[in-house]
Image (cartoon, helix red, strand yellow):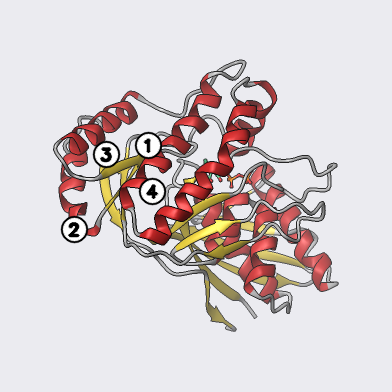
Amino acid sequence: MPVTAYAHTNIALVKYWGKRDDGGRGLNLPAVGSLSLTLDRFGTETTVELAPGHASDALTLDGTSRSGAELGRVTSFLDLVRQAAGKSDRVHVSSRNDVPTAAGLASSASGFCALAFAASRAFGLTLDERALSILARRGSGSAARSVFGGFVQLHLGTREDGEDCFAEQVPAALEARLVVVRCATGPKEVSSTFGMGHAQRTSPYFPAWVATHPADLVDAHAALAHGDLAKLGEVMEHSTLKMHATTFAARPPFFYWTPTTLAALAAVREVRARGTGAWATMDAGPHVKVLCAPADAAVVAASLAAVPGVLGVDVAAAGPGARIVRSGA
Ligand code: 2P0
């Protein structure tokens, strides 16, 4: 029986960037914790159906059959689920993104979260949210957070087996909007997995990134608890700029930003200078996401839409956690 799951994407306010050594066990343990907002728009719907007797898994992504590295990463992840379920069946995975794949709008977050949910159910596992988050993390670190709605923390954890590295929802005394500003088309040139590894290995700023990260999480939590959007926005910008600074100082250096990214950042500063609270964050791609109060979202979106080079803007609110949408034929 096919099982279909949907997961919304999430955007980190305090970023995950870098991994800690797990002795080659494939646990995908982050070097730092993170704090995100799950969005009410953008996400991935994934159907998993067992294919008994088939020799290999099959992957269809956005209507196109995939092989090579894309299929390999999915098969490696499915092996974890097969191992947990004590089964060996191959499966057919069909996945549809309503985010541009690999463009820095976090499709791996919703993608691996939806896959973890659908595949575990298809193999007869009923995981609680924590176990689902741990499983999704092994596919992609950011996917651990999409299990939950609203503001979400991915705990760093200290255990070598990663069992205390899971996400949880964080209660918040504020509402916010994220204005998603599309600054380029096409896939990004440097994947986040490669980029964070390269920065970790070669950037002299990486140790400073890790050393200063816990204070950002403390500040962000305090801002959420006190409903202080300005404080949340300020620490969010600090986190993203430190993350990108590690890429500038890597050897060789790499840049996720385009001239349109910088023009959008200038527009955010102008909006702020005019007295409207607006703060920017960028992930492993050129797009800019602008945090603001719900009442300011229309003004912020209009200001950013007017920036030359900007391809479009979408206003997102807090969204729900992942869910099973269909189970059975
Ligand atoms: C984040 N990013 O916290 C950070 C900020 C991108 C920049 O998590 O290697 O695809 O699969 O665990 O989750 C994107 O990295 O990396 C990401 P892997 P992932 O959202």
Q: Which residue is mark 1?
A: 185
Q: Amino acid at mark 1?
A: Thr
Nearest the eye: 120 or 317:
317
* Residue at 62% across, 50% down: 141
Between marks 4 and 3 in the image, the one whose residue lies nearer the viewer: 4
Residues at marks 1 and 3, CA–CA distance in whole angstroms: 8 Å
* Residue at 41% across, 64% down: 172
Badge 1 element: loop
Q: Disc 1 or 3, which lies upstream in sequence?
A: 1
Nearest the eye: 119 or 180:
180
Q: Which residue is mark 4?
A: 232
Residues at marks 4 and 2, CA–CA distance in whole angstroms: 17 Å
Q: Disc 2 or 1, which lies upstream in sequence?
A: 1
Ligand 1 closer than 8 Å to label 2 CB: no
Asked if disc 4 and disc 2 are in contact, CB closer than 8 Å, the reply is no
Image quarter for ligand 1: top right
- How far across and down, in percent of the image, does residue 210 sit? 62, 35
Q: Disc 4 or 2, which lies upstream in sequence?
A: 4
Residues at marks 1 and 4, CA–CA distance in whole angstroms: 29 Å
Between marks 3 and 2 in the image, the one whose residue lies nearer the viewer: 2
Residues at marks 2 and 1, CA–CA distance in whole angstroms: 29 Å
Q: Amino acid at mark 3?
A: Leu
- How far across and down, in percent of the image, does residue 55 sit? 80, 60
